[in-house]
Amino acid sequence: MSLFCEKCNNRRLPKWDKVENKTKWLCETCCNYVDDKNNIIDQYQK
Ligand SMILES: [Zn+2]
């Protein structure tokens, strides 16, 4: 489980995606999401 961002070492926040039925992990500093295998799957829109 990827609790920390590889780039900035900030803690990631779990965000449940009801559509895809899985948890995405948000880094608010890098503004991206990773899945539970630490692949970047989405960008956070401010
Ligand atoms: Zn980050």
Image (cartoon, rainbow, N blue to C red):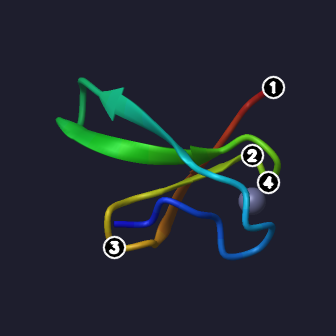
**Above or below 45: residue 4:** below
Q: Are marks 2 and 4 in contact (CB under 8 Å)?
A: yes
Q: Report which quarter residue 4 is drawn in.
A: bottom right
Residue drawn at point x = 46 percent, y = 72 percent: 39
Residue drawn at point x = 24 percent, y = 27 percent: 19
Q: How many marks?
A: 4
Mark 2 element type: loop
Mark 1 is on which residue type?
A: Lys
Q: Which residue is mark 2?
A: 31
Q: Which residue is mark 1?
A: 46
Q: Which residue is mark 3?
A: 37
Queried on whether the Cβ of the residue with tag 4 lies below 8 angstroms from ligand 1, the answer reads yes
Q: Which residue is mark 4?
A: 30
User: Which of the two labelled residues, at mark 3 and mark 2, occupies the earlier sequence position?
Assistant: 2
**Above or below 19: residue 37:** below
Q: Are marks 4 and 3 in contact (CB under 8 Å)?
A: no
In front of the other: 24 or 14? 14
* Placement of the C terminus among the 4 image quadrants: top right
Mark 4 is on which residue type?
A: Cys
Mark 4 element type: loop
Real-space Cα separation, disc 2 to disc 1, in angstroms: 8 Å
User: Which of the two labelled residues, at mark 4 and mark 1, occupies the earlier sequence position?
Assistant: 4
Real-space Cα separation, disc 1 to disc 3, in angstroms: 24 Å
User: Which of the two labelled residues, at mark 1 and mark 3, occupies the earlier sequence position?
Assistant: 3
Residue drawn at point x = 34 percent, y = 73 percent: 37
Position in image of residue 1 (x %, y %): 33, 66
| Residue 21 horizontal side relative to residue 6, left or right | left
Real-space Cα separation, disc 4 to disc 3, in angstroms: 17 Å
Position in image of residue 30 (x %, y %): 79, 54
